[in-house]
Image (cartoon, grey):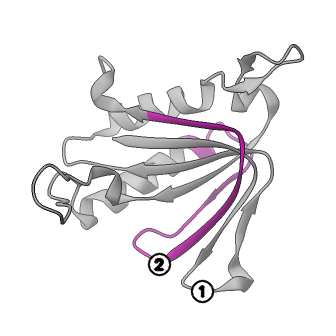
């Protein structure tokens, strides 16, 4: 499982060009998430917990010492299988490491469930849809988490 986290002042996603159904958040995190075939419920739970407890928001002294949960901030989650792009050979990325769509959608929904259990406001894109993501990056702070980097 790979996650790209961006700390934002605000963000939104438009799904399939439907401006009426624009999903927006204020201050918080935009999370791009991709899954591989080896991911399971244990990994999803670990990564969701790691994400919401990362101390990447500034305290009164300007130090990154507060988490999304500490400050009651919002989260926008967008599925992105391209996080598993393999560009080692040739010029066209291969996505064979990414989970197949029928499996990945279940993992994406499970990840959203985990987040909804602890974060007051969770908005999301739509799995497999054409999406346009807008955001105002705060910092900028961008962090990548890969489940292979942790002893899960």
Q: Which residue is mark 2?
A: 130
Which quadrant of the figure contains the N terminus? top left
Residue 127 colored in magenta in the image:
yes
Magenta range is: 115-144
Q: Which residue is mark 1?
A: 17
Nearer to us in this view, 33 or 111: 33
Labels 1 and 2 touching (C-beta < 8 A): yes
Q: At which x and y percent is residue 29?
A: 66, 44
Quadrant of the image occupied by residue 150: top left
View extreme (left): residue: 89
Residue 25 colored in magenta in the image:
no
Residue appearing at x 49%, y 51% in the figure: 32
Q: At which x and y percent is residue 93?
A: 20, 61
Q: Label 1 vs label 2: CA separation?
A: 8 Å
Locate residue 64 relative to residue 6 in the image: left or right.
right
Nearer to us in this view, 40 or 74: 74
Locate residue 106 relative to residue 22 in the image: left or right.
left
Nearer to us in this view, 59 or 115: 59
Locate residue 50 relative to residue 12 in the image: left or right.
left
Q: Which mark is residue 30?
A: none
For label 2, count other residues whose C-alpha is less than 10 Å away and answer few (under 14), some (14-19) or many (20+). few
For label 1, count other residues whose C-alpha is less than 10 Å away and answer few (under 14), some (14-19) or many (20+). few
- Vertical placement of residue 19 versus 39, above or below: below
The secondary structure type at the circle numbered 1 is: loop
- Vertical placement of residue 3 versus 107, above or below: above
Q: At which x and y percent is residue 108?
A: 42, 54
View extreme (right): residue: 60
């Amino acid at each position: 499982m790979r996650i790209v986290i961006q700390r934002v002042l605000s963000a939104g996603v438009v799904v399939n060009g439907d401006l009426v159904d624009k999903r927006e958040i204020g201050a918080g995190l935009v999370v791009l998430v991709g899954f591989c075939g080896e991911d399971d419920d244990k990994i999803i739970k670990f990564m969701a917990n790691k994400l919401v407890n990362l101390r990447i928001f500034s305290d009164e002294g300007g130090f990154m010492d507060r988490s999304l949960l500490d400050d009651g901030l919002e989260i926008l989650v967008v599925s992105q299988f391209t996080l598993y792009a393999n560009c080692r050979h040739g010029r066209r990325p291969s996505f064979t490491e990414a989970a197949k769509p029928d499996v990945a959608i279940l993992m994406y929904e499970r990840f959203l469930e985990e987040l909804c259990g602890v974060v007051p406001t969770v908005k999301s894109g739509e799995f497999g849809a054409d999406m346009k993501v807008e955001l105002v990056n705060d910092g900028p702070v961008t962090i990548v988490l890969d489940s292979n980097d942790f002893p899960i």
